[in-house]
């Protein structure tokens, strides 16, 4: 055997060894917990044979606490480039079979390398988290490694999409890397995220809680809003990442991929002419409106379980990817509150950063009143949504379906926030507030007088409310001032959105020169 052949054999053997991660026993343990290994996860996600691994021979340099005996080729992360549906991505997966996926200085270097490559080459970064956090034996070097990763998460924000899949433990300061990325997907039952674990919680606050209830997928999907999606299985998680990527561009200089549209853009949807109930206080389901107007009824929802009073997600119109923000009348009457504002603002900002037009479907009675909201800074959170809409320079089309009152009218993509096209259905009520509230304020004294004089207050208030409704509970006052560009038949909504997007295809709008704004937080 020639020397060269021998060296090649050695390379092949080393590669095989690296591919075993922490060894067969650790792999079996990982499988017995219903989890795949880092390499299996990458294989599931990317196009067949497209993964090109980097740094698979990298070793940690720690000698504390017997670490020299815990050396595994490539250390605790698998990193490289690949394609998904033929598009370049950079991916890294923490390998729990190697020292619990705990982050060493060298692992951080591997991660930073692919993040730098992603930014240079304008491709998304996908990370799969399954780790015990900072490698304790390395002390400050491990912490510094996290610092390096966080800084890159920040620099990459708004430049390339960043997606985090949480498929195991993600605890302590380590949570801040996913938190800095654009989307988080958590696997149900096998992942958790928290700053301090159950033991610390018990010691400090006395509260007894297990990991699942403290930071499991369902908690972060419905209560905190930390995660954008949850997946029942790792396979579903990978499919969600692929679907998400199909709606977004690879970087902030590109448009999202266009898909073929087989759904006629002038398809009339007669059901929409009947969808608004006669009683203005009766709810209807905004999902029915969304799926009636998008291409083939497709809709990929973001944060479906959090703040259900606002709906956010991606769809296609005439093959073009669009972000939809819609009030949901069947959840708390579609009112805006702290969580709905946070959810909407985050989504609008993502769309704007990545050149995805925003279509807003408005039916909003106002902001939720009360101390619960005021003490939790609904003023600032509402301002976040306002700021996000006002700052966004992507094409913005707003359709008002029914209520659009007061501050919430302004916040939800009104004309003054530089929306490009504002359409309203004939059922729209665009006003400072609803009829009964307005009449109570305007005619309170008169009503009191009628009551003391023994008159019919009910009849008086009904008359005034009727007068108010005729004056304001319609789209025509706003249309009279040009704040609504057109009042449209509901069944024609899809066509007007498709045509609007075509008109706005080359929209150019800028913001005043600045380092950055100071978004209310
Ligand atoms: C070094 C670690 C480690 C860590 C796990 N391991 N976490 N090694 N540093 N942080 C090792 C274990 O020693 C063990 O090694 C192997 O990984 C598997 O761990 P097990 O405990 O056997 O697994 P399991 O029972 O599944 O428990 C997993 C776990 C637990 C829940 C993650 O290991 C754990 O609680 N780890 C510590 C978590 C933590 O507190 N991390 C620090 C967070 S603070 P052997 O050789 O025996 O197989 C932080 C700061 C970041 O991360 C700051 C950024 C700014």
Image (spheres, helix red, strand yellow):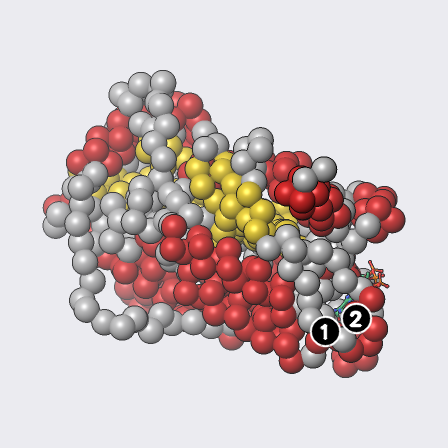
Q: Position of residue 298 (x, y in %)?
A: 45, 29
The answer to whether marks 1 and 2 mark residues whose Cβ atoms lie closer than 8 Å is yes
Which class describes the residues within 10 Å of circle 1: few (<14), some (14-19), or many (20+)? many
Q: Position of residue 489 (x, y in %)?
A: 26, 28
Task: Please tell me which residue is depicted at 38% across the width and 50% down the height of the picture.
Answer: 122
User: Does the closest atom of ligand 1 sit within 8 Å of the Cβ of label 2?
Assistant: no
Which numbered disc flags the more N-terminal residue, 1 or 2? 1
Task: Please tell me which residue is depicted at 29% across the width and 23% down the height of the picture.
Answer: 265
| Distance CA(mark 1)–CA(mark 2) | 6 Å
Q: Which quadrant would residue 98 be assigned to in this image?
A: bottom right
Extreme residue toward the front, this view: 2
Q: Position of residue 382 (x, y in %)?
A: 40, 64
Mark 2: which secondary structure? Answer: helix
Which residue is denoted by mark 2 in the rendering?
67
Q: How many marks?
A: 2
Mark 1: which secondary structure? Answer: loop
Note whether residue 97 is visible.
Answer: yes
Q: Relative to 318, is 241 on the left or the right? A: right
Which residue is denoted by mark 1 in the rendering?
62
């Amino acid at each position: 055997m020639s020397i060269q052949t021998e060296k090649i054999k050695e390379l092949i053997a080393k590669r095989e060894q690296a591919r075993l991660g922490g060894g067969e026993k650790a792999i079996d343990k990982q499988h017995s917990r219903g989890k795949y290994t880092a390499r299996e996860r990458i294989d599931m996600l990317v196009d067949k044979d497209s993964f090109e691994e980097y740094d698979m021979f990298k070793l940690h340099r720690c000698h504390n606490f017997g670490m020299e005996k815990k050396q595994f080729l490539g250390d605790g992360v698998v990193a490289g480039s690949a394609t998904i549906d033929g598009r370049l991505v950079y991916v890294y997966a923490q390998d729990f079979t190697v020292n619990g996926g705990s982050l060493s200085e060298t692992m951080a270097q591997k991660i930073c390398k692919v993040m730098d490559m992603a930014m240079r080459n304008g491709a998304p970064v996908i990370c799969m988290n399954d780790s015990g956090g900072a490698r304790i034996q390395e002390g400050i070097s491990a912490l510094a490694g996290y610092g390096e990763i966080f800084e890159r998460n920040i620099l990459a924000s708004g430049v390339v999409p960043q997606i985090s899949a949480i498929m195991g433990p993600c605890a302590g300061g380590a949570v801040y890397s996913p938190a800095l990325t654009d989307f988080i997907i958590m696997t149900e039952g096998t992942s958790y995220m928290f700053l301090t674990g159950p033991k610390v919680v018990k010691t400090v606050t006395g509260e007894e809680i297990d990991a699942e209830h403290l930071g499991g997928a369902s908690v972060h999907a419905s209560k905190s809003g930390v995660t954008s999606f949850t997946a029942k299985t790792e396979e579903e998680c990978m499919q969600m990442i692929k679907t998400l990527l199909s709606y977004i561009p690879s970087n902030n200089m590109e448009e999202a991929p266009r898909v073929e549209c087989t759904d006629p853009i002038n398809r009339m949807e007669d059901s929409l002419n009947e969808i608004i109930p006669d009683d203005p206080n009766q709810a209807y389901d905004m999902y029915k409106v969304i799926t009636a107007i998008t291409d083939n009824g497709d809709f990929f929802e973001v944060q479906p379980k959090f703040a259900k009073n606002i709906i956010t997600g991606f769809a296609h119109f005439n093959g073009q990817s669009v972000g939809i923000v819609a009030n949901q009348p069947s959840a708390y009457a579609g009112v805006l509150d702290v969580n709905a504002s946070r959810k909407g603002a985050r989504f609008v900002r993502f769309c704007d950063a990545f050149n995805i037009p925003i279509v807003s479907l408005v039916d909003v009675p106002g902001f939720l009143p009360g101390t619960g909201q005021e003490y939790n800074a609904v003023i600032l959170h509402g301002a976040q949504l306002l700021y996000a809409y006002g700052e966004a320079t992507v094409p913005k089309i707003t359709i008002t379906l029914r209520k659009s009152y007061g501050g919430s009218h302004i916040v939800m993509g009104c004309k003054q926030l530089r929306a490009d096209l504002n359409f309203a259905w004939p059922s729209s009520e665009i006003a400072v507030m609803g009829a009964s509230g307005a009449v109570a304020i305007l005619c309170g004294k008169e009503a009191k007088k009628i009551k003391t004089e023994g008159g019919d207050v009910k009849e008086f208030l009904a008359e005034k409310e009727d007068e108010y409704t005729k004056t304001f509970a319609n789209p025509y006052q706003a249309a009279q001032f040009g704040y609504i560009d057109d009042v449209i038949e509901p069944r024609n909504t899809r066509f007007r959105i498709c045509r609007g997007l075509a008109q706005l295809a080359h929209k150019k709008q800028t913001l005043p020169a600045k380092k950055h704004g100071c978004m209310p937080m």
